[in-house]
């Protein structure tokens, strides 16, 4: 009636709000109904653990191992604090690996076992990496065997880290022996798929298709391992072995990038003809030469005392706007000094500072 009489807006009906809980139900009772105080306390502890793990990880990436250790000890030395989990240990181990504190990493692994926290493959990889970066290849080898005895499976990170450890310890023969193990595992993995399976065809497909499919790198021992093997052969001045490893990569249709070819160029030593073969192959695949490739190639010409050709490559980098780094300048400055061209060396040094 009022609306019809000229009111612009109809009056709103007052609707009683529905009460979801009994008036006598306290807030504590409602919390208990959702899980109680215990769940709320557990949730808070979980948040503390997650935030602390993030902090330790951030400090590890900044190589601030002392601060990372202090954050880790808050979880172990404060009453009521959540216990550290696998992520906590792994983040601290990463800090030790980045700062080459292999003994601390090994001790932390022992403390982890004493705390009844079962380490996984990632944990062992971090400790092996800390030992490998320190040149402690014997310790890295022992940890690898301990990991296998714990019924943990090695992955591509395990193998590449172990190979790098052997390489730093000038044990390239042992590194190549690990490579043979990897090759057998990959061949067995492919063979188990059957000759006519789509998965097998995909693995044995072209290199370009493999580049587009990242699942191979995630599910199989990938090109990182073989690049590390080529680097090991390079350190041992074993050009033929490096070429064999590259052939295996092609056979298994693994991704071959500029880093792989840079390692192969380093294996050439002072053999310019071998380096030209590698460059021709890169050109045939349409691969662009980057800083690491040019540096390795300049190094080959420098070792063979073909300094003019090396400087031509240096100028080629400038013309093609390829980034010059300190390794590039160090090589060409050393060449000028060896050629007794002090003016050229001084000019390049000033250019580097600019």
Image (spheres, rainbow, N blue to C red):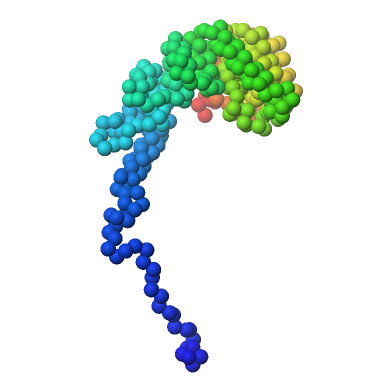
For residue 136, what is the image quadrant? Answer: top left
**Does residue 246 appear anywhere in the picture?**
no
Question: On the rendered structure, is 200 left or right of 324?
Answer: right
Front residue of this view, candidates 74 and 258? 74
Asked if 35 appears above or below 163 in the picture, the reply is below
Question: On the rendered structure, is 295 left or right of 75?
Answer: right
**Does residue 34 appear anywhere in the picture?**
yes
Front residue of this view, candidates 26 and 143? 26
Front residue of this view, candidates 181 and 226? 181
Asked if 177 appears above or below 47 in the picture, the reply is above
The location of residue 38, given as percent across then percent down, is 30, 45
Question: On the rendered structure, is 283 left or right of 69?
Answer: right
Front residue of this view, candidates 53 and 21? 21
The location of residue 301, given as percent across then percent down, is 64, 13
- The residue shown at (65%, 17%) is 187
- The residue shown at (25%, 34%) is 78
The location of residue 2, given as percent across then percent down, is 46, 90
């Amino acid at each position: 009636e009022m609306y019809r009489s000229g009111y612009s807006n109809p009056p709103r009906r007052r609707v009683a709000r529905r009460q979801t809980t009994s008036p006598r139900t306290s807030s504590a009772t409602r919390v208990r109904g959702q899980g109680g105080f215990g769940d709320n306390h557990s949730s808070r502890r979980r948040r503390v653990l997650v935030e602390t793990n993030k902090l330790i990880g951030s400090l590890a990436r900044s190589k601030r191992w002392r601060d990372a250790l202090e954050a880790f000890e808050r979880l172990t030395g404060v009453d009521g604090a959540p216990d550290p989990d696998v992520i906590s240990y792994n983040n601290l181990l990463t800090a030790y690996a980045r700062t080459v504190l292999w003994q601390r990493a090994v001790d932390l692994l022992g403390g982890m076992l004493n705390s009844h926290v079962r380490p996984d493959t990632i944990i062992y990889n971090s400790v092996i990496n800390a030992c490998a970066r320190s040149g402690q290849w014997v310790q890295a080898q022992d940890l690898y065997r301990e990991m296998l005895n714990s019924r943990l499976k090695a992955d591509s990170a395990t193998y590449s880290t172990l190979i790098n450890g052997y390489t730093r310890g000038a044990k390239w023969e042992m590194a190549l022996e690990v490579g043979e193990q990897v090759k057998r595992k990959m061949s067995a993995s492919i063979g188990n798929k059957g000759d006519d399976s789509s998965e097998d065809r995909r693995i044995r497909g072209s290199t370009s298709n493999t580049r587009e499919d990242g699942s191979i790198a995630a599910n199989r021992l990938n090109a990182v391992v073989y690049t590390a093997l080529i680097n090991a052969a390079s350190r041992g001045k074993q050009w033929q072995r490096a070429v064999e490893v590259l052939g295996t990569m092609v056979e298994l249709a693994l991704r071959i990038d500029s880093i792989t070819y840079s390692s192969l160029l380093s294996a050439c030593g002072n053999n310019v003809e071998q380096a030209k073969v590698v460059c021709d192959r890169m050109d045939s695949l349409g691969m662009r030469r980057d800083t690491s490739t040019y540096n390795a190639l300049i190094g080959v010409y420098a070792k063979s005392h073909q300094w003019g050709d090396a400087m031509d490559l240096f100028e080629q980098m400038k013309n093609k706007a390829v980034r010059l780094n300190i390794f590039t300048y160090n090589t060409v400055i050393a060449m000028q000094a060896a050629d007794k061209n002090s003016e050229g060396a001084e000019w390049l040094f000033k250019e580097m500072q600019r």
